[in-house]
Image (cartoon, rainbow, N blue to C red):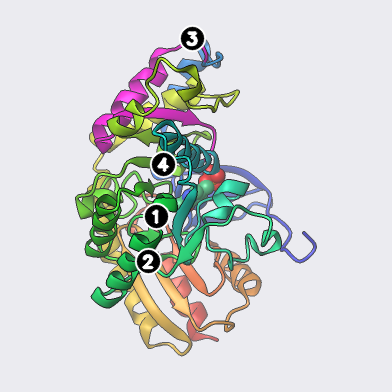
Amino acid sequence: MKTALPPLSVLGAKGSEIYLEDGRTLIDGIASWWTACHGYGHPALISAVQKQAETLSHIMFAGLTHTPAETLAAKLCTMTGMARAFFVDSGSVAVEVALKMALQFWRNHGQPQRTKFVCFEHGYHGDTLGAMSVSDPEQNFHLAFKGMLAENHCVPLPRNTQQMQAFEAFIAHHQSSFAGLIIEPLVQGAGGMKFHTPDTLRSIADICKKYDILLIADEIATGFGRTGSMFACEQAGIAPDIMCVGKALTGGMMTLAATLASSRIFDGFWSDDASHALMHGPTYMANPLACAVANASIDLFATEPRLEQVQNIAAQMFEELAKCKDLQGVVDVRVMGAIGVVQLEKGRMNRHALRQQFVGKGLWIRPLEDVIYLTPAFTIAPNQLSSLCSGIYDELRQR
Ligand SMILES: *Cc1c(COP(=O)(O)O)cnc(C)c1O
C-alpha cells in the first residue's frame, strides 16, 4: 500500500533475532504475531518438518487419515478438555468453522431461528466475512466492509457487577435468536491488547450456560502459554462449547489452526441423517507437515520450561515497562504473561515514525493504533527483552 512503510527484506531468523538482507540484525518483540513462541529455527521443529516431509508431506483428509493428525487431535483434546478436533488452515477459517458449527448445531436440534452471535467491542476474530461479522465493526481492519456483513450483536465487554447485570438482561431478552457468543478469553488481541479478569470471563461463561448460548472461546492469540497458563480458559476454570486455536499451534513454523468441540457439540452432528454432518472441508485440511510440527511444538512445552519462561518474562516486563507510566502521553502500562502493553493517548503517536525509530535502534516493534506491545518468543534472553523495554522507554521519553 502506498501509505505503508516499504517492507524490510529478511534473509533469516534465529531465536529472537531477525537478519535483514542489508546486514542489520533486529531483536524481535512480536514473534511474528505471537506465533513463534519457541523462537525462530528451533532444531526440534526443523527436524519434525524434515522427517515428516520424507514420509508424507500431504494427503487429502477425506476417506483417509494419518498418525500426525490423530496424535495432534488427541494431544489438543487432552490439553484443553475438549472432545474433538477439526483441522483448518488458518485462524480466520477456524472461526468460520466455529460459527458454522454453532449454527448447524441448532439447526440439527430443530432451532434454526438461532442465527445471531454475541461478540464484544474491541474483539478481533479474523479477516474473512464471517469472522469480520463477529469482530468490532469500528476497527480500522474492517471499516471498509461495514454494512456488507451478517448482522450480529457487538456489545461492550461487561467489567463490573452493574454492567454484568445489564449484559445478562440483554442476553435474556434475545436468548431465542442467539446461536452463540464468541470471546477472546482474558486478552482481546489485535483489537487493542485489552485485558479482562478471570472472574469476568467466568461470569460471562455462566450467563452463556444459564441461557444455553454456545460459548466459543477464540484462543488463537491466547493459547499455548501466552497469558501464563497453557490456555486462558484454564485461569477462569471454564469449559467452552467450542474453542479455536491457531497462531502458536505450530510454534510459528507453518499455517495450521483447529476448531475444537465439546462432546455435546459433536453429538449434535452424529446422526443417521447425512444432512446433519458438518459441512466444511478445506483442501489442505490436517496437512501432515503442519500436524507433525504442531506435535513437536506441543512436546517442547513439556521438555523445555516454557511456562516458567513466561512467568520470568512477565516479571521482567512488569518491572522494566512500569517506568513508562510516568511519561507524558502514556495512559496505561499492563502485563499479562508474555504480553506487555504501553498504551498511549489517542492520536498521539505516528506509528510509522515510531516503527522506523525502533528499527533504527535494532528493534522489531510494530505498534497497533494507540498501543505499543511486546509479545516476544518465550525463549527470549533477559538482555534482549531489556533492549526492547528500554527501547520503548527511551523512544517515548524523547517525544
Ligand atoms: C490472529 C487471530 C485470528 C485470525 O487468525 P489468522 O490465522 O490470521 O486467520 C482470529 N482470532 C484471533 C483472536 C486472532 O488473534
Is residue 339 visible in the rendered image? The answer is no
Position above or below: 23 against 106: below
Query: Label 2 to label 1, Cα distance in Å?
Result: 16 Å
Classify mark 4 as within 8 Å of ligand 1 or not, answering yes or no: yes
Instruction: Identify residue for label 4.
Output: 244
Q: CA distance from mark 3 to mark 2?
A: 45 Å
Q: Looking at the image, which residue sits at the far bottom? A: 328
- Identify the mark nearer the N-term, 2 or 1: 2
Q: Earlier in the sequence, mark 3 or mark 2?
A: 3
Q: CA–CA distance between discs 4 and 2?
A: 25 Å
State the SS at label 4: strand
In the picture of the structure, the residue carrying the numbered disc 2 is 170
Whether residues under marks 4 and 2 lie with C-beta atoms below 8 angstroms apart, the answer is no
Q: In this picture, is 233 found above or below 153?
A: above
Q: Measured along the vertical axis of the image, is residue 182 above or below residue 246?
A: below
Quarter of the image for the C terminus: give it: bottom right
Q: CA distance from mark 1 to mark 3?
A: 33 Å
Between 376 and 263, which is closer to the camera in this rendering? Answer: 263
Going 27% across and 54% down the picture, which residue do you hit?
205
Dot 3 alpha-carbon crowd within 10 angstroms: few under 14, some 14 to 19, many 20 or more = few
Where residue 313 sits: x, y (%)?
30, 59
Tell me, yes or no, if residue 138 can be seen here.
yes
Q: Residues within 10 Å of mark 4 (few under 14, many from 20)?
A: many
The stretch of residues the image draws in magenta is 62-90
Q: Amino acid at mark 4?
A: Cys
Question: Which label's residue is closer to the chain start, 4 or 2?
Answer: 2
Circle 3 sits in a helix, a strand or a loop, which is it?
loop
